[in-house]
């Protein structure tokens, strides 16, 4: 009787781990289009501006799926230039040069807090889950072999 049910505990643990540690998508869902400049996130406003001052930076990383450090954007390609706007402090807004030569206004929304290499801990949680399952299997096999 005991030999037939040795697999029950590991099966239950595996089943529960699916609900306790669900797989997550690696993609990111963005609330809005943005650029990051000088450690701050700027929300693309949809408003074009014409009073451009000087170039202040450019997009160094682009992705619509993952976050990056530096002058990152979820909508503008790497190399897209940033400009200051005449009469507007860069702490309030900047301009982004679009492919057609026009300048899109982006409003400062807050500090960009993403840090590369900062783990969400999912790898550690998965490791603990696997070790727990392996230990449970070991205990069951040891008990069966007595």
Image (cartoon, grey):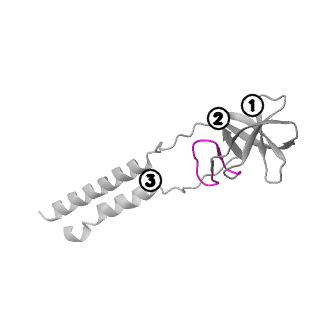
Q: Residue furthest front?
A: 54
Mark 1 or mark 3: whose residue is earlier in sequence: 3
The region drawn magenta spans 62-76
- Whether residue 106 is situated above or below residue 139 in the rendered picture: above
Which mark is on residue 38?
2
In the rendered structure, which disc, 3 or 2, sits on the residue that comes first in sequence?
3
SS at mark 2? loop
Q: Residue at x 67, y 33 (%)?
A: 110
Residue 5: percent from left, percent from top = 25, 67
Q: Quadrant of residue 95?
A: top right
Q: Which residue is mark 1?
A: 90
What is the C-alpha distance between the residues marked 2 and 1?
10 Å
**Mark 3 lies on residue:** 21
In magenta stretch: residue 72: yes
- Specify whether residue 15 is painted magenta: no
Q: x, y (%) of residue 121? A: 43, 45
């Amino acid at each position: 009787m005991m030999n037939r049910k040795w697999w029950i505990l590991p099966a239950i643990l595996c089943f529960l781990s699916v609900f306790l540690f669900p797989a997550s998508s690696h993609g990111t869902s963005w609330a809005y289009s943005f650029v990051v400049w000088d450690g701050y996130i700027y929300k693309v406003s949809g408003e074009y501006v014409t009073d451009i001052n000087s170039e202040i930076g450019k997009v160094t990383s682009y992705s619509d799926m993952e976050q990056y450090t530096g002058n990152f954007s979820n909508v503008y390609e790497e190399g897209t230039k940033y400009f200051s706007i005449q009469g507007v402090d860069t702490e309030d807004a900047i301009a982004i040069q679009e492919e057609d030569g026009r300048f899109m206004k982006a409003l400062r929304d807050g500090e960009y807090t993403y840090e590369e290499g900062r783990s969400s801990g999912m790898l550690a949680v998965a490791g603990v889950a696997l070790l727990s399952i392996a230990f449970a299997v070991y205990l069951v096999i040891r008990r069966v072999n007595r």
